[in-house]
Image (cartoon, rainbow, N blue to C red):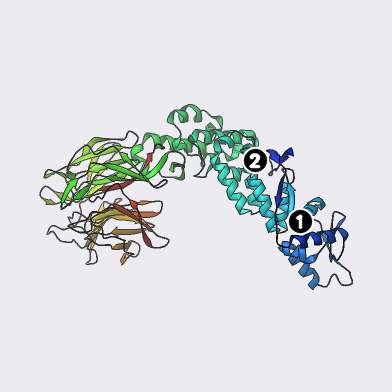
């Protein structure tokens, strides 16, 4: 029989229409079916029953053992009633319950004694609440299974709230995944406008919210506020803060968002909109603008990707240059080609990301040391010559601090270079800063705790420098410590959780960890492969080491491995497009077309 019914109301919400639902018998076939049938006949005849439950003036006679075997709540209640002696002198144990409806108890007992029950959209919620409260776990599973099959765009948020309130994890996760996946449909329903502020924020803030356009999220926020502007307008900034405004098109920001009265009347809202405008206007400075709002949703087509830039290959005992630029999307574990390098046979360059763009500086080509700076524009997928350093160099380091690109040391036309300069990507100007105390090339450099660190490298005599140099940008001063423990060269350094990690080098698997607070150095877990001339980045709280070469004769490595700080271990990852070393490696946000 088909029934049309309304089901499920969450606090402050309209009833949720579960639509067409067939009265669905949930039939269990427990062992001893004939015994249960006999016990049920005894229950109906009130034969051999030893427990009387009184609900709303109605009396239900049952068998203690049968009820206790199905409900932990009644098992505990029966045990305590027997132990406290309050039932002395009575022929049967008697329990009076005030927090249960009589017709609901009747349905629960029917299931306990027969293993079958007709559930429909009119009683599912009430039965689940009672089954959960009185710990009829098998019955809960039956109700959950029914409700999972009844999820629609018009009721999933109410089911989600109910499941959370009852701590029904299976139904909660099912309803949550369903609601996130069909957000465009949910956004058109009345139900979303009636859920609580906290539930609404938790929903639209989720990274997995399936929307191709952040404009729809913004419009849904405005609709929710305008449903009851008197009481909800005070939450405008709190709600707008979980919209990924930087991913809204600039023209929409200017023509729609800027003209919304709710936004215009709130200084905090205007600040959030201005933050998004700056993100659009200053792409070079995006590295310094990272907030939860600049993190792309998983469905947006924008992902944080690891980009491999150029490098060298081993072909037999000879080497050749690569012009390929590729990126790896960890969301789907796929590699994608990007615009190739616009030059050939260049090596020993340095690569760094600033905002969502990539800057390649210096290097050597045909024996000539270069000062060129090329920029890969992520939005346009092309390379352009944008500037030149004041000092040509190769085998140098580059990094970003406070929105500016620093180039440090390296090998120049006449030997090691102590020169340090920084580049403002907005004004396209270079500025010299204090030189390195010790001129080195092929060092490991990173930013940590407001300082720039340069570890080891090769000194002017061609040997391991054995020195740690640190720079404070605010005072434009360097300091250094010489130590035989700092013997790295041809190895990258990255910063994670306040520690500096130096990876591989000198054909080693070693991970060296520096604690800037304590000033000490210790050995970390070995990588799976020896890696010299590898590159490394940090993404989503993990370190990724890419490529490298095992020995001077090869082979070059065509894999990555990831360091997981929670387990302090390295894990090998699927192969890269090809073996490579002396390459650049950075992380940027990149629009990845589906398919």
Disc 2 is placed on an element classified as loop
Q: In what quadrant of the picture does the C terminus appear?
A: top left
Foreground residue among 24 and 87 = 24
Q: Is residue 184 left or right of residue 290?
A: right
Residue denoted by label 1: 114
Q: Residues within 10 Å of mark 1 (few under 14, many from 20)?
A: some
Q: Residue 460: image x %, image y %?
A: 13, 57
Q: Residues within 10 Å of mark 2 (few under 14, many from 20)?
A: many
Q: Is residue 105 left or right of residue 172?
A: right
Residue denoted by label 2: 155
Foreground residue among 288 and 378 = 378
Q: Residue 500: image x %, image y %?
A: 32, 58
Residue 272 shows in this picture: yes
- Residue occupying the far front of the picture: 34
Q: Is residue 316 left or right of residue 255?
A: left
Disc 1 is placed on an element classified as helix
- The residue under the point 44% across, 43% down is 295
Q: In what quadrant of the picture does the N terminus appear?
A: top right
Give the Cα distance between marks 1 and 2.
31 Å
Q: Mark 1 or mark 2: name the one nearer the start of the chain.
A: 1
Q: Residue 152: image x %, image y %?
A: 62, 39
């Amino acid at each position: 029989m088909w029934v049309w019914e309304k089901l499920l109301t969450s606090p402050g919400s309209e009833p949720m229409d579960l639509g067409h639902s067939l009265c669905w018998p949930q039939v269990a076939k427990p062992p001893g079916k004939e015994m249960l049938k006999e016990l049920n006949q005894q229950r109906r005849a009130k034969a051999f029953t030893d427990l009387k439950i009184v609900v709303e003036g109605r009396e239900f006679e049952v068998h203690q053992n049968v009820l206790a075997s199905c409900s932990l709540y009644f098992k505990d209640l029966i045990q305590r009633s027997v132990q406290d002696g309050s039932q002395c002198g009575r022929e049967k144990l008697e329990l009076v319950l005030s927090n249960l409806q009589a017709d609901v108890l009747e349905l629960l007992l029917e299931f306990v004694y027969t293993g079958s029950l007709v559930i429909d959209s009119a009683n599912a919620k009430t039965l689940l609440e009672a089954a959960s409260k009185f710990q009829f776990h098998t019955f809960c599973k039956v109700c959950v299974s029914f409700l999972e099959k009844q999820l629609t765009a018009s009721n999933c948020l109410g089911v989600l709230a109910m499941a959370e309130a009852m701590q029904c994890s299976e139904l909660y996760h099912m309803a949550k995944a369903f609601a996130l996946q069909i957000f465009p449909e949910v956004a058109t329903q009345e139900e979303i406008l009636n859920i609580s502020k906290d539930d609404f924020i938790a929903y639209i803030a989720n990274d997995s919210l399936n929307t191709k356009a952040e404009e729809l999220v913004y419009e849904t926020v405005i609709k929710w506020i305008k449903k009851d502007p008197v009481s909800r307008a005070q939450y405008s900034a709190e709600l707008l803060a979980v919209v990924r405004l930087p991913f809204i098109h600039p023209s929409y920001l200017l023509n729609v968002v800027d003209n919304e009265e709710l936004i215009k009347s709130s200084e905090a809202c205007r600040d959030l909109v201005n933050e998004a405008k700056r993100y659009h206007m200053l792409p070079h400075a995006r590295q310094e603008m990272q907030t939860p709002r600049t993190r792309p949703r998983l469905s947006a087509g924008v992902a944080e990707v690891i980009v491999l830039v150029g490098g060298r290959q081993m072909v037999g005992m000879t080497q050749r240059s690569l012009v390929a630029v590729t990126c790896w999307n960890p969301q789907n574990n796929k590699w994608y080609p990007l615009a190739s390098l616009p030059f050939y046979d260049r090596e020993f360059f340095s690569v760094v990301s600033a905002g969502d763009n990539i800057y390649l500086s210096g290097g050597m080509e045909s024996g000539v040391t270069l000062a060129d700076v090329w920029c890969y524009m992520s939005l346009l997928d092309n390379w352009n010559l944008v500037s030149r350093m004041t000092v040509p160099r190769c085998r140098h380091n580059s990094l970003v601090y406070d929105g500016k690109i620093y180039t440090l040391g390296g090998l120049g036309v006449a030997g090691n270079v102590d020169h340090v300069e920084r580049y403002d990507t907005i004004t396209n100007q270079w500025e010299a800063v204090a030189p390195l105390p010790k001129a080195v090339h092929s060092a490991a450099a990173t930013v940590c705790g407001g300082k720039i660190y340069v570890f080891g490298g090769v000194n002017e005599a061609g040997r391991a420098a054995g020195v740690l140099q640190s720079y404070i940008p605010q005072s434009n001063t360097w300091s250094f410590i010489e130590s035989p423990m700092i013997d790295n060269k041809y190895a990258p350094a990255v910063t994670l959780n306040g520690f500096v990690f130096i990876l591989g080098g000198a054909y080693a698997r070693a991970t060296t960890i520096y604690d800037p607070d304590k000033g000490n150095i210790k050995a970390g877990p070995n990588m799976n492969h020896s890696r010299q001339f590898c590159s490394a980045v940090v993404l989503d709280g993990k370190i990724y080491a890419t490529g490298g070469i095992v020995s001077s004769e090869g082979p070059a490595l065509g894999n990555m491995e990831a360091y997981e700080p929670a387990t302090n271990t390295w894990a090998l990852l699927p192969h890269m497009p090809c073996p490579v070393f002396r390459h650049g490696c950075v992380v940027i946000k990149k629009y990845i077309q589906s398919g």
